[in-house]
Every structure is written in C-alpha cells, then in structure tokens.
Amino acid sequence: MQFISEQRHDDGVLEREFTLGEIPGTEIPGTLWTPESAAPVPLILMAHNNGLPKNAARLVARARASAACGYAVASIDAPGCGDRPQSAADEQARTDIRRALQASEPVDDLFESFIGPLVEKAAPEWRTTLDALLELPDIGGPVGYSGWTAVGIRLAVTEPRIAAAAFFAGGYVPRAQREEARQVTVPLLFLLQWDDEGNPRQRALDLFDAFGTREKTLHANLGGHTGTPWFEVEDGNRFYDRHLK
Amino acid sequence: MQFISEQRHDDGVLEREFTLGEIPGTEIPGTLWTPESAAPVPLILMAHNNGLPKNAARLVARARASAACGYAVASIDAPGCGDRPQSAADEQARTDIRRALQASEPVDDLFESFIGPLVEKAAPEWRTTLDALLELPDIGGPVGYSGWTAVGIRLAVTEPRIAAAAFFAGGYVPRAQREEARQVTVPLLFLLQWDDEGNPRQRALDLFDAFGTREKTLHANLGGHTGTPWFEVEDGNRFYDRHLK
C-alpha cells in the first residue's frame, strides 16, 4: 500500500489517496479517511456500486461523516470503474445495458453477465485491501462494510473479519449472491429507496427476507435511486456504533 | 383535566395520572410524562393499540425515554380498554376474535366491526385530550403522534395540530383508515415487525405505499409483534427531533 497524497480537512479528518499493487495497469486506486484519534479506530469498507467513481461527491460526503464519527473509512475503485482502465468489453456491456434500459427491454441477463464476473473480481481485491489496511497503526478493528450489496454479500460470507454490514438495495444482485444471502449472519442494515427506478422493489424486499442473519433492519425511504435522505448516513453511523464500538 | 397522582423519577421525569371528564363511568384515564424543563416542551400523543393498558411496562419505558429526551408524552386508555369499563359486547367481540384466531378462521370482518367503531370513538377523545394538554403551562407544541396506526391516520387527517407521526404497523387498520391513508401528509415513520403474527406483512407494505406524505420512512425489523428492538425508540425520538424541535 502506497500513499500518494494526503489532505487534512477542517473537521480533523485526514484524507489519503493510495494505490495497492505494483504491476502497471492493475494497481487498485483507493482513498482512506481517518479521524484524529490517539487509539486505533474501527474500519468501514465503503464499496460503491460499480457505476460511480470513488471520488463521487455524495460518497465522499458519507465517508467523511463516518470518519468524523470515529471510523477509518476506505474506498477503492472496482476493476474497470472510476480511475481504472476500462476494457472494450466493459464499454460494450455498459452500452448494451444502457440501450436495453432505454428501450425498456429485459436487462437481467445483461446485468448477470456483466455484474456477476465483476463481483467475482472485486471481492478478492477488497480482501487484499483489508489485509493492507489492518496493518496500518491507526486502524484497529472491528470491520464494517457499507454500500454495494452484491460485493457485500460475497465478503460477508467469505470474510470472517466483517462484523456488521449496511447494504444499499439499489443495484443488480447476481443470482449467485441472491443464493448466498441466506448465509449472511452478521448484523445488517438494508437501505432501500422505495421508488428506485430500474431496481424492482419486490426483489429488494425478497432479498431482505432471504438474509440469514437474525439481526436485520430495513430502512426504506420514498424517492428514487439517488434520493436517500442525509439522516440515513447518521442512522448508519449509529448502526456501526452499536456493532463496531 | 384533573391530576390524581404524581411521581418524580430519578431521571427527572415527572409522571402524573389524570382523568378527563366528570360523568362517572365515562372519564378518560390518562398518564402524562414531562421532563424537567424551564420552557414549554413539544408534545407526543402516545396511543397504544387497544389490547394494551396504558401502564403496560413497555409502553411506560418508551414514554419515559421520550420524556427524558425533552418531550411531554401523554397516553390515554381507549373506550373499553385498560382501566375503563368494558361492555358485554366488547367482551363478546374479543372472545369471538380470539376463538377465530385460534381456529385459523378469517378474522377481518370481526376486526372490522370491532376496531372500526373503536377508532371512531377513540379519535375524538384524543382531540379532547389534546385540547386539555395544550392548556398546561409546561406543554407548548408542536405535536407528534406515536403508536396505534388506525387512530393515528384518523387524527393525522382531521387534526391539523399533528405535525409528525410514527405509526406501529402491528394491528388491524379498518378499511376507512386504509382509504384515508392517502390523505396523510405529515412526515411519517412507519415501524414494522417483519414476522408479526396475525398482521399480514404485505398489507403493512401496501399501507406504507399508500400514505400520501412525501416524507415517509419505513423501519422493519426481524421478529414478532412484541420484538421491536429498543434502538427503534431512540430512532423514533430522533425522528421527532427532526420535526418537532
């Protein structure tokens, strides 16, 4: 893990850009936000759905809010996303999905063949990132997860260091992860936008029902995909406070 | 409004029993919890589903938690409930419902003919209680509502002084109130127990969908009717903080 820039914000939060790996073209770019703290702090892995770069304004705002609450927060770009090289195949897949959505054609198979492999590639990168982060002196544990549901399910069932997870329901969840949902046993907060365009509500409710954990909470708010109210960020931090502090 | 007893708790909350009305047999018995405060405080009307007396331990715990957060909290027993005289007809209706539930027979019509009229009787009593409470020097406004969904819908659409409402989804909602739900426009927190025995989940989700307000949030937790986790009380108080303070 190599830090390439750092910036101290007014609220005391330190924001550092890093890269992981050394083979040109395959480095993982990431950002780490840490609070001013004398003792090591718990960690939140903030995985965004693949459509957004890790420096999208609303992701950064959430990360800084959690850091200001006493958490180290880390985000990386998934393969082919954000600052990472995009293959011609990725570009074609995205074009096909956009076209199908605009034409109101079925998109499940397109999503399945694009997101399915992406989750398989992204999850091991998150584990590599987690290994590196936990070696830093200012990060302790336990570890929480936030955001992208499909990768979160994969991590929650394969990575015993994840102690609690908050998933955002918007975004395609491949069949394999819908099956794996039954094996998720960590405390869970599931965040749903009631009128999320392109993400069927009933499928999200079925997924909430399927999670194997005994301690799961659904928060649903009126509005579309990007309309999550800010108070949910605060609720999310309190969820982590209950399970990571 | 006549206070008949008072008790100061360790957390500074003052608990007072009161009665409203003077005709023997028709008095409304109530409890008022108020925090230590120099200035008048906002009010929460805590209406419980008709099956519980207002001094049920878990209701009292919630009321005191909200009072300790700076709210006056008032609860009354509905006609035929708690400390109030129960008619032979009420008793028969409850027996019929219990028998039908045990035999897994349809209960909607029994509930409709029992709860429908009860809501019609209870709502005006809450308005009378609200009038009396707002005359007390230690209570200001605005006014929030908590608990029993059916009475809450009735009040929210007929009582402009209600500024925000948190409804508990468990409990039969008569057809008239399911229709009225579209007219509810105050900010809303809707609390659902995912496996509430005897309260169909889909009906609760349909009701959440129907509420006319633009600012509505659903919180659902795993477990049965009485299994609501304590952190929902704290979430509820923060919901009121956003809208009543």
Image: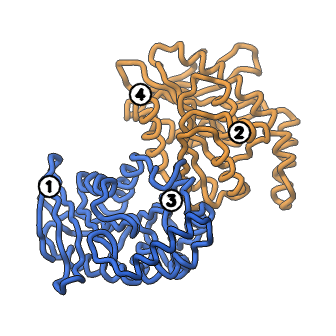
Chain colours: A blue, B orange
Residue A182 appears in the figure: no
Rendered image quadrant of residue B201: bottom right
Whole-angstrom CA distance, mark 1 to mark 3, is 30 Å
- Judged from the image, the secondary structure of the residue bearing numbered disc 1 is loop
Mark 4 or 3: the one toward you: 3
Which residue is at a point 63% across and 30% down the rendered structure image? B156
**Which residue type carries mark 1?**
Glu
Q: Count the numbered circles shown.
A: 4
Kind of residue sitting beneath label 4: Pro
| Both labels 1 and 2 in a single chain | no
**Which amino acid type corresponds to the residue marked 3 in the rendered image?**
Thr
Mark nearer the N terminus (1 vs 3): 1
Whether the residues at callouts 1 and 3 have beta carbons within 8 Å, the answer is: no
The residue shown at (85%, 42%) is B93
Q: Which residue is mark 3?
A: A217
Tell which of B81 and A201 is nearer to you.
A201
Protein chain holding label 2 = B
Question: What residue sits right under mark 1 in the picture?
Answer: A36
Chain-order first, disc 2 or disc 4: 4
Q: Helix or strand or loop: what does disc 4 sit on?
A: loop
Say what secondary structure mark 2 lies in: loop
The label number, if any, that marks residue B35 in the structure image: 4
